[in-house]
Every structure is written in C-alpha cells, then in structure tokens.
Image (cartoon, coloured by chain):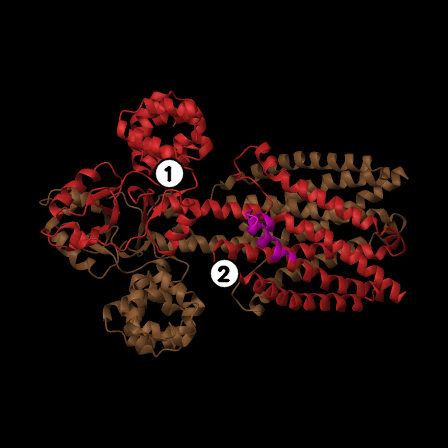
Chain colours: A brown, B red
Amino acid sequence: IELKEENSILDNLSELHPADIAELFRELDLEEAKYLYLLADDETAADVITELEEDERKRFLDSLPSEVIAKRFIDKMESDDAADVLGEMDDDRQQEVLSHMDDIKSAGDIADLLSYDEDTAGGLMAKEFIKVKESWNLTTCLRSMRRQGEEMDEVYYVYVVDNDGILKGTLSLKRLLLSPIHKTVKDIYNDDLISVRTDVPAEEVSAIMEKYDLVALPVIDSINRLVGRITIDDVVDFIREEAEKDYQLASGITDDVETSDRVWVHTRARMPWLIIGMIGGVLSSRVVSGFVNLMETHPELSFFMGLIAAMGGNIGMQSSAIIVQSLASGSMGLDTTWGKLFKELGIAFINATILSAIILGYNLIIGENLALTYTVSIALFSVVVFASLFGTFIPLLMKRMNIDPAVATGPFVTTLNDIIGMFLYLTIATICYNILI
Amino acid sequence: IELKEENSILDNLSELHPADIAELFRELDLEEAKYLYLLADDETAADVITELEEDERKRFLDSLPSEVIAKRFIDKMESDDAADVLGEMDDDRQQEVLSHMDDIKSAGDIADLLSYDEDTAGGLMAKEFIKVKESWNLTTCLRSMRRQGEEMDEVYYVYVVDNDGILKGTLSLKRLLLSPIHKTVKDIYNDDLISVRTDVPAEEVSAIMEKYDLVALPVIDSINRLVGRITIDDVVDFIREEAEKDYQLASGITDDVETSDRVWVHTRARMPWLIIGMIGGVLSSRVVSGFVNLMETHPELSFFMGLIAAMGGNIGMQSSAIIVQSLASGSMGLDTTWGKLFKELGIAFINATILSAIILGYNLIIGENLALTYTVSIALFSVVVFASLFGTFIPLLMKRMNIDPAVATGPFVTTLNDIIGMFLYLTIATICYNILI
C-alpha cells in the first residue's frame, strides 16, 4: 500500500466487499485512508463510509470539506444511511452538507429523516421504496418499477398505494412473476398488511419483524400514507446493539464501550456501579458493626460472611435475569405478576433446602460448633428465599416505574442482597447463639 | 371459543397471522387446541406449528398420529421448518412421519437436512430456492422461475448455476426487471458472490450475514454445488438465542430456560453455579478461619469483608464482560492479548485509586481506627487490580482452551475473586496491624 501503485490498488479494491475494505481501512492512518478513499469509485467509497465504526467515520469526515462529503458520499448513499451519517454531525455541518447535494429530492428526504427520533420507526426507515398505484395494470406497473428501481440497491417488496398515497398492501415479486400481464395491480396485490407508524419505538419494530419473520416493513404517517420502509439488516444491527447493552448492564457497565475505547471512557462507564457497590459495602459494614459485640465473642461467625453474601448475590442475579428476559421477549402477561412471584418462591424453597442441607452436612462433618452450624444453614435458607423474591420483584417494579429492568440484574440486586444477607445472618446468629450457648 | 361455533371461529382465524394464532393457542388446553388446529386450513395450521414454542409443539404433536402430522403439517411446511420440527422427535417417529409424506421429493429433502448438525449452515438452510442455468435466455428463465416459485412463500434471490449444478452467482429480481428480454442469464447475473459450505458453524453464518447485510445466503457442498439457502429470519432467531444464552450464562444460569418452564427445570439450570458459589464460599471460609486469631482480637475487620468481596466480584464481572464481548464480536486481534492486559491494568489502577481514596476519606471522617482504615484502602486497591487482571485473563484463557468464555463472566470470576479478596484483605490486615499496633 505504501508504494501507492494506483492501478494495482484499484484492482484489489474493486474485488473486495465494502465491509472488508472498511476493516482494512481501520488499520491505516488518516492520510493513507483518505488517499485510498479518493481513489475508490464513488459507490464503493460511500458504502465503505457506511460500514465504518462511528468514531472512525467521524474522524475521517471531519477532515473533509462539506462539499466533498455531499457530492462524493451522501449523494450516493441510501437515505437511511445518509441520515445516520449526517445525524452524527452537528446541525451547522448538516445544513452545509445538505446544501451541497446535487439531488434536491434526496436532500429533502434526508432532511425529513433527520427530523425523526433515532429510536423510532421513523429513525430506522429509508425513503427508497417502490410504490405502485392499485389502479395500474401490470404493464404500467412494471414500467414504473423499472424506473423507480434504478436508484435502489435491492428490491424485496413493492408497495401498493391508492391515489392519495395511502398504503393499501404489498405486491410480491413472486406474484408479479406468476400473473398474466393483462391484470391490474388491484387483482393481485396482497392486502394482508403489517405496517408501523413513524413514532413506533424501535424495540417494537424489531419485535414485530421478528415475530412475523419480515424482511421489510412499510412505515406510514398518522393518516396512513406510506412514507418509508425498514429493512431487516437495520433491525439486526439494532437487536445486536440491544443485546450487548443488556449484557453490559447485567455486568455493571453503563455506557456502550468497546475494547478499543480509551481508558477514561472505560473508567467512566464502570464507575457508577462501582460507587453503588461501595455505598452498599459501606452500608453493610454499618450493619455488621451493629453486631460488634457478637463478632467479638464469636469471631468464627466471620468465616461464612463471604458465603452468605455471595449466595445472596448469585441467587438475586439469576432470578432477576430470568424476569428481565421474559419482560424483554414479551413472553409474560400483565396479570401474572403474582404467578411469577409464587413460582419463584417455589424454586427458591427447593434451592434453599438443597443448599442449606449441603452446608449443614459440611459443617457437621468438619465438626464446626453447633450454634454456627445452625446459624449458617438457617441464614442461607432465608437469604436464598429473600434474594429470589427481591430478584423477581425489583425488575417488575422498575418496569412499572418505566426504568429499564436490565439495570436491576447487575450490581444493584447483588448489592441490596449483600446488605440484607448480612443483616439476616447476624440476626439469626444472635438468636441461635442465645438459645444454644 | 367454548361454544365451538365453527364458522365464526374460522372467520376469526383466517384474519389472524399464524404467529398471533400461535400466541392465542398457548392459552388453550390440549383438546381445545387440537380441535382448532383441525379446523384451520392446512397452510395456516402448518405455519402455526412452526411458530409454537418447542415444548408446546412437542406436547401437541405427541398427541397426534404420524400420518396426520405428515400429511397435514410437514407436507405443507418449508423444508427447513419441517426439518426443525422433525429434529425434535426421536428417530423412529421421524422415519414414520417421513414415510407417510405424499411428496417424496420433499421427504428426501427433509431427510437430507436432518443429517446436518443443527448448529451449522447445513442445519440452518432450506431446500427451497430458485435456480436458473447461466446458459438460459430470460424467457426460459422467467418460465422456469414461475414454475419453481409456485411452492415457495417468497422469493428474494435467484441463484445461477452451470450445467453441473455448481453455483456461479445470483440474479437479482431488480436486474431481471430492468433487463430486455432477449438477453441471457449469463449477461446479467452477478458473479460477485458470498456463499458458505454446509459445515460452516452457525455463528460464522450469522457473522457473515450481518457483516454483508445479506437477506439470503446460498449454501454449497464440498464441490461448490448449490444445495440450499439460509434466510435472515432464521439467523435473527439464532442471534437472539445466542444473546439470551450469553446473558443467562453471565447471570449464572446454565440451560436456556423460559419463565414458563417447570420449577424443576429452573432448579436444574441454576444449581450448577450455585454449587460452585457454595464451594467458593466454603473455600473462603477456610481462608478466613486461617486468620481466626486476628479476627478474635480485631472483630472490626469483619465490618468490611462484605465490601471487599463485593467490589472484587463487581470489578471481575465488568472486566470479563468487556473481554467476552470483544471476543464474541471478533473485534480483537490475536496478538493483542498483552495489549488488553496492559490497558485493563491502566483502567484498574485508575479505578483502584479513586475507590480506595473514597473509602479512605470515609473511614477517616467516621474516625475508624487507623490500622483498619489503612487495611481497607490498601486491600481495596489490591483487590481491584487483581480482580481486573483475573477478569481479563480468565476469559482469554478459556477461549484458548476452547471453552465458551461467556461462562467466565458469571459466578465463576466472582467466586474466585471472593476467595482471593478475603486472602488479600486479611494478609494486608495482619501486616498493617503488626506495624501500627
């Protein structure tokens, strides 16, 4: 690459898929990347831009004048990708780039798309779609489709509208291939239609597309006019991002971080939960210090503090993870809250019985004193039951308070259960030691 | 529904999407569901079967004779769905159902599909696709497509093969619409092709389809003959399942469980990690009991045991989650193991400094004794650094040993860090108390 032999580079580039070029460019410095971009043909360059990671794209585009961005990249992109790229710039720069675009119609489309919230159907949709009128015959229809299809990458569905632009149904390419040419669109289109309004949240869009196995979903405005379509590839990206976010929340990381981010980005993303964990730890130290006399006479109580705290944390995390997932997948009815709690209680009792029996056996075998033996088993039983209930209840409560319940699975439930666990353990110890010693 | 007014039910059913019917049926008992199924038309009934959850489907199909299953359901399904449904039955039952099928060709296709491992491209693919020969002209091509398309739900891509059935490229419906009828397939097909072998793992299939934004992916055998195609909806399901599995592993649940599963299924899925947590707790109790003399003279040491253990666990979980995710998304080079460790060390030092400074301030303000104050801060610092390193190192080690690194993020790292944390805390306490008191 350093030799900059234009032709051989061009040959190589043209054989690669834009996604692969994007990966390759990640390893180049800014000047090299810029040189290569300007060498690549416009279509490819625009595709590569779309495939880049957000921060790389920003760094690269910041170094280019608005006119070049408009004419070489934005003009060649599909409207949804263009809106995503522009959405990462500040308002002034957006205006500048849009004003330099050759194609006034697509500049208008992009400006429209920029006005929607990123996490709604409007923010996910693209303006490129093929629409035909229900009154057309198939010859007119095919001719119009050919014209409309020229500016698109790929066609999966053709949408049927009436004279007011109101969405009536879809025309499958398969039906079109199978039907005699003298029919009209009205005869063969499918009016069994699933569509969403522009203001439907992205979660719902992805749930609908998954449930009905859709490849594309038409988007309508408040009076049912067709305004765009969402394709499955954008939704796949969304599903992946959501899953990563949930996973990170469960692991106690607040922002979406990548390993390649800088050290302080990582620190900032992790600190909130660590501070909450610290506060929890300090509170639990207050609980324990309330029992300082007991600890002084019976230091062996400290042996099992770690076990009690850890089990409470583990159980709580398991219970809340199950609930969070069933909330996320929507597989839970609204009226079954009590059902869930009762079932969880059943599971909790079984787990609690097994685990406290094991630890009872262990302590009897190693000949630990009886008061401690009973304390540990009874406390473990109570902690498992309590932690299960909290783990189930807190995500449900958060959901009702419109907080993302995934937040609950991480250190939050763990921390709460630590404190409750310590309190239960030492209270039970006080009772057991009073009775037995 | 109880009134069983056939016609009104049928009217209602025919207006619903199979996915919605499947949801509705979840709330009926077996007899009611059976009655409704036999009422619905074959196409719908087959679709509903596909949409059901695995255990519901099993329960329902077990109650029906093989012949009914073959003729009413399997015969009407796409081959990949049919193979999935049959794959859930035992071998004898599979043979029985296949032998009752009317369409010998699709029975053969399904038997082929059943021979592939479920988690490979072969296991994901379907046999229904449209293929055309490169030598055909577009008229022949269209005629053949019409014929082949009749048995398919929807057509996204047409595959081009040579006379030996070897995959040459794709023919986009858009290109077909845009091209004059006298051309041959050879002139207009796209030879820029992404395909996978039947033995490619499902993870790789989904990574490829995501990376290149594909809606369908052709599958070839070892000599490049086209044998099937994978569509994005199957991959979306796969991505969702994988994400859920990782999330559950991170939360300490081994099997894929749903809230609707029975109590003992839940218990079984949770028990392994709880037992590991218990073993960890017992080991940590051994560590603490080794310091029993120290605990006896300084019971205040027990106040902060919970904090140290919890912070070790939280930090370890965060670090391993970051690594597991970067391993999963493939955004990590092979040679950067040391780089990751050094970076994590940097983050760890910053976090450790901030957190131990906070707890130092807290203990100074509440006037805790100096030995304890220093012990807690120094121990917290060490625990944070150690937990970060373990959290980073263990998933990398697991990856190298071909164990799913997601296993590491859950209770495993937490438990290990609990034990190490206790040991560090009490060792540091011994030293601090020796010096200061």
The answer for which chain carries disc 2 is B
Depth order, front residue of B32/B254 = B254
Judging from the image, what secondary structure is the residue with disc 2 in?
Answer: loop
In magenta stretch: residue B406: yes
Pick whichever, A201 or B137, lies toward us.
B137
- Provide residue A128's location: percent of width, then percent of height: 26, 59
Among numbered discs 2 and 1, the one appearing first in the sequence? 1
Query: Can I make out residue B4 in this image?
Result: no
Q: Amino acid at mark 1?
A: Asp
The residue that label 1 is drawn on is: B20
From the top left corner, tell me how far across and down residue A381 is, in percent. Answer: 72, 38
- Predominant SS of the magenta segment: helix
The one nearer the camera, A39 or B75, is: A39
Q: Residue at x 71, y 46 (%)?
A: B280
Residue B412 vs residue B28: left or right?
Answer: right
Count neighbours of disc 1 (C-alpha within 10 A) and say few if under 14, some if 14 to 19, many if 20 or more.
some
Q: Nearer the viewer, residue B39 or A88?
A: A88
Disc 2 to disc 1, how far (Cα)? Answer: 44 Å
Q: Quadrant of the C terminus of chain A?
A: top right
Does the residue at mark 2 contact the one at mark 1 (Cβ under 8 Å)? Answer: no
The residue singled out by tag 2 in the image is B333
Disc 2 packing (10 Å; few <14; some 14–19; many ≥20): few
Mark 1 belongs to which subunit? B
| Residue B294 as seen in the image, left or right of residue B126 | right
Tell me what residue is drawn at x 43 percent, y 41 percent: B119
Left or right, residue B254 beside residue A191: right
- Which mark identifies residue B156? none
Give the magenta part as a residue range.
B390-409
Amino acid type at circle 2 is Gly
